[in-house]
Amino acid sequence: MQNGNKCRPALIKDFELMKYPILAYGDPVLRKKATAIAPDEYPHLKELIENMFETMYAAHGVGLAAPQIGLSMRLFVVDASPFADDDKSLEGFKKAFVNATVLEETGEEWPFNEGCLSIPDIREDIYRQKNVRVSYYDENWKHHEEAFSGMAARIIQHEYDHIEGKLFTDKLSPLRRRLIEKKLNDISKGIVDVEYKMKFPAATTGN
Ligand code: ZN
């Protein structure tokens, strides 16, 4: 989430020390339900997570999911500390979520003007429930079952949608979606102003 060719697992090692380009709206990887990770399959998980944080910070994001860098894995990272001014509990809120499952969402839906690093230059009011309870593993394969609310829940819900192959634009009314359709198509083609590295699925000339 914003504050603002399909990679195979075998390639992760090669990418270890570089930042990833972020896939733009229209890339089929963003529409796939991502698969769970097994510990022995991904010995470089910690490095991958570090690089995802770096990529996210470079793009001024507060959340980034593996499908957004072309990896269809159930993994996302969150750093909610930019919101700590409004909510002290978010100070140092930096977490990786491996094989996350949302167990329960409760509370009233509330709107927030969301953006997504894969959909630059579009922000929309999105309604989500206030609380979420999640089962997940951290970067050390320690299991957690934890409840989050407010902005922390919001970011987790947005990133969780990514590993389910969903985007925040799916939640818009048909009318609203029609109004931004041209803009979404332009983003797929790379016709958008963006200051971080992206990969556009329908670009005709390079990236
Ligand atoms: Zn997003």
Image (cartoon, grey):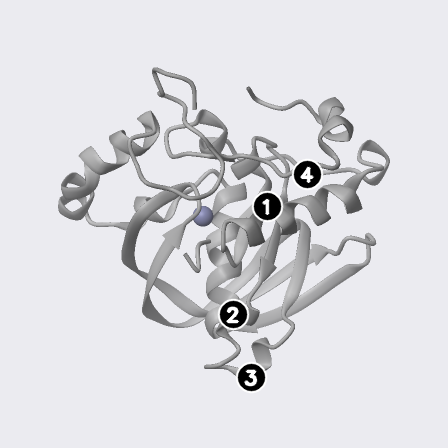
Instruction: Describe the element under mark 3 as helix, strand or loop.
Output: helix
Q: Is mark 3 within 8 Å of ligand 1?
A: no
Earlier along the polypeptide chain: callout 2 or callout 3?
A: 2
Residue 97 figure quarter: bottom right
Earlier along the polypeptide chain: callout 4 or callout 2?
A: 4
Residue holding disc 1: 55
Q: State the quadrant of the C terminus.
A: top left
Residue holding disc 4: 36
Label 2 or label 3, whichever lies nearer to me, is 2
Q: Give x and y (percent) for residue 204.
A: 34, 15
**C-alpha span from label 2 to label 3:** 10 Å
**C-alpha span from label 4 to label 2:** 29 Å
Earlier along the polypeptide chain: callout 3 or callout 1?
A: 1
Is residue 178 among what the camera can see? yes
Q: Which mark is residue 88?
A: 3
Label 4 or label 2, whichever lies nearer to me, is 2
Q: Which mark is residue 82?
A: 2
Query: Label 3 neighbourhood size at 10 Å, few (<14), some (14-19), many (20+)?
Result: few
Q: Going 31% across and 46% down the picture, which residue do you hit?
A: 169
Amino acid tagged 2: Pro
- Left or right of 77? Residue 46 is right
Earlier along the polypeptide chain: callout 1 or callout 2?
A: 1
Amino acid tagged 4: Ala
Residue 136 figure quarter: bottom right
Instruction: Describe the element under mark 4 as helix, strand or loop.
Output: loop
Amino acid tagged 1: Thr
Residues at discs 4 and 2 in contact (Cβ within 8 Å): no
Q: Give x and y (percent) for residue 200.
A: 41, 27
**C-alpha span from label 4 to label 1:** 22 Å
Q: Going 26% across and 31% down the picture, which residue do you hit?
A: 186
Q: Give x and y (percent) for residue 72.
A: 59, 32
